[in-house]
Image (cartoon, grey):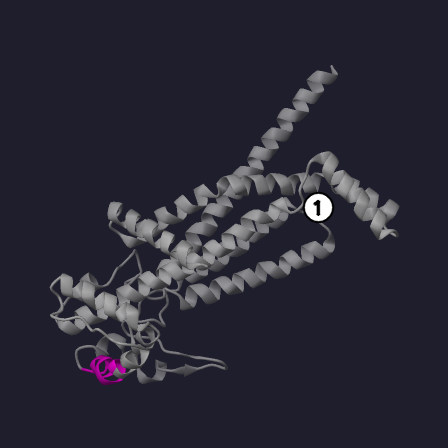
Amino acid sequence: MMAPINNLLLSIINLIYKVIPDYGFAIIAFTLLIKLCISPLDLKSRRSMKRMADLNPKMEALKKKYGNDQEKYNQKMQELYAKEKINPLSGCLPMLLSFPILIAMFSAMRTVANEELVRQFLTFQADPSIDVSLLAQPFLWIKNLWMPDTPFATVLPDLNSLQVIGYETWNSASQQLVAQGILSAPLNLANQNALTEYINNVVAPFIASAEYAPHVAAISPAFANINFIFFSLTIFKDFNGLYILPALAVVSQIFMTRISTQQTAQTQAQGQANMKMMNWMFAAMSLLFCTTSSAAFSLYWVTSNVFAIIQQIAFAKYFEWQDRKAAIAEEVGIK
């Protein structure tokens, strides 16, 4: 079901990359394009949420009057919605739309990242003298956009990163390198078992070799496989990032949700409590995704959040202007 959306996003990313031959800026441009396309739906949703907030006094009055008769209360609420021409579910549409886009974007970024990581490994394997800075895809402080922006990730792909990539990606990446004259023959792996054998017999020994091992070595043995309760971490000598994008993702996520909550501050206390819980839940999800995913996906996440923050502020100013305009028109009409 998600494959068509995933393929569409991949096509758009590749098209933008042809115009902007830098994946970092191409991802930023792609994110802005997607957000602009769904902005009309966001505006409609915000308008619906504002109208719902404006109805709160009437809704509270109905609750006080018919609170003991749930059926009557629901009937009066439906009559109120019909009179005010409000669909209480319309505010959920952008959220329902943005979630599959997020999942598809995650899948698309992972597809591109996996292919690029295999290309980087096979290219380095073919010519270990190549300059790593030319082989990787740097962006600002990030040395390789296809690895996570953390000190716990290497610049060149390590064994853990390569083991999770499917055999089809290895085949397609090797075919592209053959077409470019970097490899003499494609891999032609028959299945995942063939890939496992290839990784055990070829990839793992090369990563442990004198040419590759320095690029995936810890700062010192003391910083290798630092054990925590549920996981272990290694701080690498040739680390990929500074944890800036994951930190920005968390901060922007909290700020974005807080602005959204403030703009609907008239909701009930129970709703406020739920929003607060969701705020921290989304922040934790941001940290997890952006720590374990490629810096490319983290860049998409941060750009999307920053755009949403600016958009929410702009919508709020627009609604304030509309309210002032309506108030002036009403005052003139009364006079």
Expressed as whole percent of the image width and height from the top left, the position of residue 215 reads 24, 74
The answer to which of 93 and 310 lies nearer the viewer is 93
The amino acid at mark 1 is Gln
Using the image, determine if residue 41 lies above or below residue 109. above
Q: Is 325 part of what is drawn in magenta?
A: no
Which residue is located at x 20 percent, y 73 percent? 187
Expressed as whole percent of the image width and height from the top left, the position of residue 3 reads 41, 59
Which residue is located at x 57 percent, y 53 percent? 257
Q: Looking at the image, can residue 155 be seen? A: no
Helix, strand or loop under label 1: loop
Number of numbered tags placed on the structure image = 1
User: What residue span does the magenta drawing correspond to?
Assistant: 198-209
Where does label 1 land, which residue? Answer: 266
Mark 1 crowd level (few <14, some 14–19, many ≥20, 10 Å Cα): some
Q: Is 204 part of what is drawn in magenta?
A: yes
Q: Say left or right for 5 vs 48.
A: left
Give the main secondary structure, helix, strand or loop, of the magenta stretch. Answer: helix
Which residue is located at x 42 percent, y 67 percent? 291
Q: Say left or right for 110 vs 87.
A: left
- Residue at the far top in the pictured view: 335
Q: Quadrant of the C terminus?
A: top right
